Image (cartoon, rainbow, N blue to C red):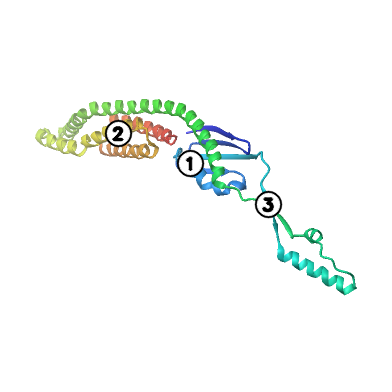
Amino acid sequence: MTGFGRGEYRDNEHGFTVEIKSVNHRYHDTVLRFPKSLNGLEDKIRQTIAGKLVRGHIEAMISRVDYAEPKRTVRVNPALAITYSQAIQEVAESIGAPFEKNPYRIASFPEVLVMEEEKEDIEALWVKLEVAVKNALENLLSMRVVEGEALANDLHMRVARLEEYIAQIEAYTPSVFGAYRDGLMARMRDVLADLGAEPDEARILQEAAIYAEKVNITEELVRLKSHIRQFDKTLHSSESVGRKLDFIVQEINRETNTIASKVNNFGIASIVIEIKSEIEKIREQIQNVE
């Protein structure tokens, strides 16, 4: 499902802004954009997002502002200072000039004194950033709840239509046997009319019984109704149900195809077409379900 959420954190040292948006996707796919200084927190960010968003293409943008001056230390390179001092002494001796040890002069040479920023406590940063990430996720989920309710209502309506179509097939099924028997009887009478003979009604009934057994779809209808009940029950679950619904729809489609292949009847075939059309609409919708 689609959604957008924004979260922030501010204190005297740091400021974080997190924006997360999601669009429909069959699987979970997360793209992160954040400053290099937060590279060490990438796994924690991904795990936090995955804990709330199971499905969808997700993009998260994180910005950082530092309000406090970075903490710095000065490191002395004593070996290099000695090397500089010895070199200056050699120069002085080579030209006959007096040599005087001057630490301030030595300290001014490159790399003798090196200023370094103290390494950041990445875990302390996460305590702050986590607040912004979770706030963004909560706001995104609130938006998705509204869409989810509308989606659930639409799916309930389509499931109700499937149940109506199945009821129509059940009502139509008994007439299939009679139609086949009457049609077979009529064809046999036409064939035997020129011979002045009557068809063997017992044999006709036997053939019709064999046909009725061949096209019996009772088991398929029972399984179809069971899958639809399970679909409806799953819709009410508080867990992530997108992939489960996808599997159930595959089973509904499988049973529908079996009915279509077993019953060579125009009336039932017309209803099956309506069922398959509704299944495709359901399949499209559940790609949006978490």
Residue drawn at x 52%, y 43% is: 45
Q: CA distance from mark 2 to mark 1?
A: 31 Å
Residue assigned mark 3: 73
Q: Secondary structure at mark 2?
A: helix
Q: Position of residue 50 (x, y in %)?
A: 46, 41
Q: Position of residue 37 (x, y in %)?
A: 61, 47
Q: CA distance from mark 3 to mark 2?
A: 65 Å
Occupied quadrant, residue 151:
top left
Looking at the picture, does residue 171 appear above or below residue 191? above
Q: Position of residue 120 (x, y in %)?
A: 60, 48
User: Which label sits on residue 158?
Assistant: none
Q: Are marks 3 and 1 in contact (CB under 8 Å)?
A: no
Residue assigned mark 2: 230
Q: Is residue 235 left or right of residue 214?
A: right
Q: Secondary structure at mark 1?
A: helix
Q: Nearer the viewer, residue 127 or 191?
A: 127
Q: Earlier in the sequence, mark 3 or mark 1?
A: 1
Residue drawn at x 49%, y 43% is: 29
Q: Earlier in the sequence, mark 2 or mark 1?
A: 1
Residue drawn at x 46%, y 28% is: 147
Give the amino acid type for the residue marked by disc 1 in the picture: Thr
Q: Earlier in the sequence, mark 3 or mark 2?
A: 3
Looking at the picture, does residue 157 appear above or below residue 72? above
Give the amino acid type for the residue marked by disc 2 in the picture: Gln
Q: Position of residue 131 (x, y in %)?
A: 53, 36
Q: How many marks?
A: 3
Q: Residue furthest right?
A: 96
Q: Is residue 237 left or right of residue 27?
A: left
